[in-house]
Image (tube, rainbow, N blue to C red):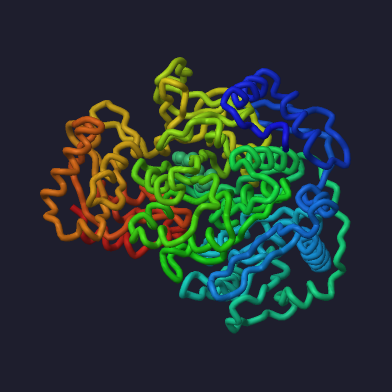
Amino acid sequence: MSNYHIKRLEEYFQVYRKSVRYPEIFWEEIAEEHFVWRKKWDSVLEWDFTKPEIKWFDGAKLNITENCIDRHLQIRGDKTAILFEPNDPNEEAQHITYRELHDQVCRMANVLKDKGIQKGDRVVIYLPMVPELAISVLACARIGAIHSVVFAGFSSTALATRIVDCGAKMVLTSDGSYRGKKILDLKSIVDEGLQECPSIESVLVVKRTGTPVEMVENRDYWLAPLMESAYSDCVPEIMEAEDPLFILYTSGSTGKPKGMMHTTAGYMVYTAFTFKNVFQYREDDIYWCTADIGWITGHSYIVYGPLANGATTVMFEGVPSYPDYGRFWEIVQKHKINQFYTAPTAIRALAKENLDFVTKYDLSSLKVLGTVGEPINEEAWHWYNDHVGEKNCPIVDTWWQTETGGILISPVPFSTPTKPTYATLPMPGIQPTLMDETGTEIKGNPADGRLCIKFPWPSIARTIWGNHQRYKDTYFSAYEGKYFTGDGALRDEVGYYRITGRVDDVIIVSGHNLGTAPIEDAINEHPAVAESAIVGFPHDIKGNALYGYIILKETGESRDRSNLSKEINEQIANKIGPIAKLDKIQFVPGLPKTRSGKIMRRILRKIASNEMGNLGDTSTLLNPEVVDQIIEERL
Ligand code: WT7
C-alpha cells in the first residue's frame, strides 16, 4: 500500500482533503491498486443512511483469503504470517509461514465442507488464542461461510444465545484453554450451551490442553485427524463484494447482544488501508496486537488487516501477568516486536506493578505503540510513553467500534503530532462531526458534543443480524442522515478529537454536561489512586450528584480515607471545577468489568441509586464477585 504510506502532516491533509472531496475516486484507487479481484465493481458506493443501506464496490467479485494468503505465496511464501507465542514461556513459539497458512486454511476449509458447511452457513468459533482460531476464521472465509467468533471466556449461556441468534450449524472449540496458571474446560462449557441449540449439527474439537472431554457420537469430532487426511488445496469460493463475511456480537447497553454484520470487499479494503497507515508497517516488521480474536480488534488487526498486507502478526495465547508482570515486555524483546497494540486497561494494570518488570527488557525494537478500547487517561499515557516507548515511539490512540470495522480516528505516526488522551484526527475518508442536544451540528473549535459520522466508509457494519430495524434505531435515528456513535467527544482548537466516553454515561449535574473520562482522569492523577469510575445518582437539588468508586494503589491503602476523599475532591475542583466534586466516595477492591476491560457503569449506577434488585444481564462480567463486595460496602 505504498502510495498511501503517509509520512508527513501535509501529506495527511492532502490525502484527507482528496478523500472527502472525491471519496469514490479515493477508495477506487486504493481498491484497484492493492487487491486481487476476480471481477471489478460496477459502482464504488451506493448509500442511503435513512434506510439505512450501504454498498461498497457493488458487483465486484473476490475472495478475501486470496488477498490475505494466496497472492503472497510467490513473493513471501516462506515469510512468517502468524507467529504464535504460547501461554507457557517454556513452550516453543510457532512460526507459521504464508505457505503453511495456505495449506492449513485449505485443509480446514475442506473439513468444513465435508461436514456440510456451505456458502452462507454460520459457523461459531469458540476457541482460545491458538493458531486454529485464525485458521478457522480464514477457512470459513475461504468457502464463504459466515464466521461468528465468540470470545472463549464467555459463559455457556452467552455462547448459546449467540448460536441461537445466528442459527449456526457448527461450533469449533477446544478441549480446554490455558489462561496463565489456570485451565478452562471449554468443551464442557460448549456441551452445556448446546443443550439449547438445535441448529448445531457438528462440533469440531481442537486438542490443546489434554483435558478429558466427552465426545457426542455423530456430532463431535477431533479436528487434527480430519485435517491430516484433508486435501491441502481448496479453490476459493468467489464472493460478491457485499456478501457477509462475519457476524460479531457486541453488547448493547440493554437487551440482548447485537450481531454486527460485516461484508467482504469494503471491510477488506478499509482494514488493510488503516493497518498499513496507522501502524506504518514495513515488510520485515513484526507486529503484535494483544487483543483476543474474539473482539473486533483481533478480527481487523490480528487477522485480516495484517495478512492483507503480507505482514507477520503475533498471536499470544496467555495473559500479561503470567508467569509475571513482565511477560509482555519479555515477548517484545524475544520476538523484536516493532509495533505493539494493546488496551488502556492492560497498561494501567501493568503500570501498577514494579517498574523493574519493564526496565529489565530490551524494548529498543519498538517503533509504534497503540491503544484501543476506552479513553486512555493521562497518567497511563505517560507511563506507556516514558517506560515502554522510552519517549521514542509515537502512541496511536485509535478510536473505533465493533460497528465501524476499522480505526476511524487516530494519529498517523511520524506525521500527526500526538497529544495525551486525544485520538486526534480522522483517518482519510472519515467525516466526523459533533452534534448538540438539539440535533444541530456544532461548527468551529473548540467544541463538545455527540460524535457522529456524516459519510459512509467501506468497513461500516451493514446491519444487525436478523434485526435491521434495531440497526436503524440504534445508529441512524438520533441524528438524521448521520451515523451516531453513542460516544461523546471534545474537539480542541486545532480540530483534534478526544473521546470522553459513552453518552449514556454522561451525567448532567446542575444542568452541566459532564463526561466521565475527564473527571476520572483527574481522580486517577492522585498518587494514591489506581483506578476509578464515577456515575450519577438522583439528587433533590442538583438533579444528579456524583458517586465515585475508587481503587487505591497498594501505597494508598494505609491512608486515612476521609483525608483521601478530601484530597481527591480538591483535585477535581482544581482540574475541572467544583461542579464535578463527588458527593460520595466509596473505596472498592475492584470494578465490575466486561471481558474487554470496559467498566460496566450500568451496574455501578444501579448500586449508587439503590436499585440492587435489578442489575440486568451480568453474564458477560469478568469479575461478578466484586459486585457483591461493592454492594456490601455501599454508602
Ligand atoms: C467503544 C467501542 C474498537 C475495538 C475495541 C472496542 C470506546 C474505543 C477508544 C479510544 C476512547 C474508545 C468507545 C467506543 N473506545 N476506542 N481510543 N478512546 N474510547 O470495541 O467494544 O465495540 O467498543 O469503545 O466508547 O464507542 P467496542
Q: Is residue 88 left or right of residue 536?
A: right
Q: Position of residue 497 (x, y in %)?
A: 46, 29
Q: Which residue is pictured at 43% across the width and 63% down the height?
A: 326
Tell me if residue 533 can be seen: yes
Measured along the vertical axis of the image, is residue 227 above or below residue 62? below
Q: Nearer the viewer, residue 317 or 473?
A: 317
Q: Residue furthest bottom?
A: 212
Tell me if residue 477 can be seen: no
Q: Which residue is pictured at 74% across the width and 28% down the height?
A: 45
Rendered image quadrant of residue 270: top right
Q: Which residue is pictured at 64% across the width and 44% down the height?
A: 281
Q: Position of residue 214 (x, y in %)?
A: 63, 82
Rendered image quadrant of residue 460: top right
Q: Is residue 338 left or right of residue 182?
A: right
Q: Nearer the viewer, residue 57 or 624?
A: 57
Q: Which residue is pictured at 61% across the width and 52% down the height?
A: 287
Q: Nearer the viewer, residue 479 or 183?
A: 183
Q: Nearer the viewer, residue 559 or 127?
A: 559
Measured along the vertical axis of the image, is residue 535 above or below residue 322? above
How many badges with numbers are in the image?
0
Q: Position of residue 468 (x, y in %)?
A: 63, 39
